[in-house]
Amino acid sequence: MNFGLTDEQQILANVARRFADERAPISKVRDVMESANGFDPGLWSAMAELGWLGLTIGEDYGGAGLDWVDLAVLLEETGRGLLPSPLVSHSLAATAISEFGNDEQKRRLLPSLADGSAIGAVAILEASEVLGPGGIELAGTPDGGGYKLTGKKS
């Protein structure tokens, strides 16, 4: 059994490392941390052009259709360089929609996540910060053929 990276994964790792080193030196990371957005839209656009934002999104929706191992390679390199971006939460949101969204949701949401014109996030915690059913304050009420969610998540 081979536990090494494929040639394509090694290329991805090398490109990601070079990108992080060149585009996000620690001085830039510090500046971005102090910004109102907490990320650099220019870096985000460049990441979109490289196809990273749609790495695990299916090709039918504008993504690369790769898997979690490929994403792990990318995250390892962007994490090593502290690349200031919402890549992890974005990838989790895209995966949630890909796995559990209906066809209409996938058609409506995934292309904009893949091209970076939208940023995805997964909201898990509420004000109480209690994980599990006991911490859920968000309420769902019937609305037409579905439900309307009200509350706040962080």
Image: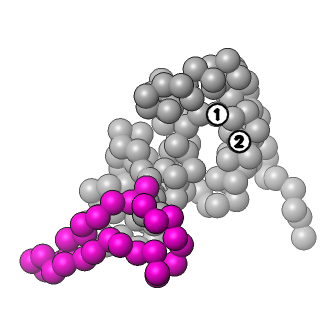
> Which residue is at a point 59% across and 33% down the rendered structure image?
84
In the rendering, at what x and y percent does residue 97 appear? Answer: 40, 65
Determine whether label 2 and label 1 are within 8 Å by CB.
yes
| Outermost front residue | 128
Foreground pick, 27 / 153 = 153
**Left or right position of 39 against 60:** right
The stretch in magenta equals 127-154
Q: Is residue 134 above or below residue 86?
A: below
Q: Is residue 96 above or below residue 47?
A: below
| Outermost right residue | 1
Within the image, what quadrant is residue 10 found in?
A: top right
**Considering the image in quadrants, where does the N terminus appear?**
bottom right
In the rendering, at what x and y percent does residue 31 appear? Answer: 58, 20
Q: Is residue 31 above or below residue 133?
A: above
Q: Is residue 153 magenta?
A: yes
> Which residue is at a point 25% across and 76% down the rendered structure image?
140
Foreground pick, 42 / 14 = 42
Q: Is residue 153 above or below residue 45?
A: below
Q: Amino acid at mark 2?
A: Gly
Q: Amino acid at mark 1?
A: Leu
**Left or right position of 134 against 18:** left
Foreground pick, 126 / 143 = 126
In the rendering, at what x and y percent does residue 105 appear? Answer: 29, 64
- Count of marks, rendered view: 2
> Which residue is at a point 87% across and 62% down the rendered structure image?
3
Give how far apart the Cα atoms at labels 2 and 1 are: 6 Å
| Element type at mark 1 | loop
Residue annotated with mark 2: 79
Within the image, what quadrant is residue 152 found in?
A: bottom left
Q: Is residue 88 magenta?
A: no
Residue annotated with mark 1: 83
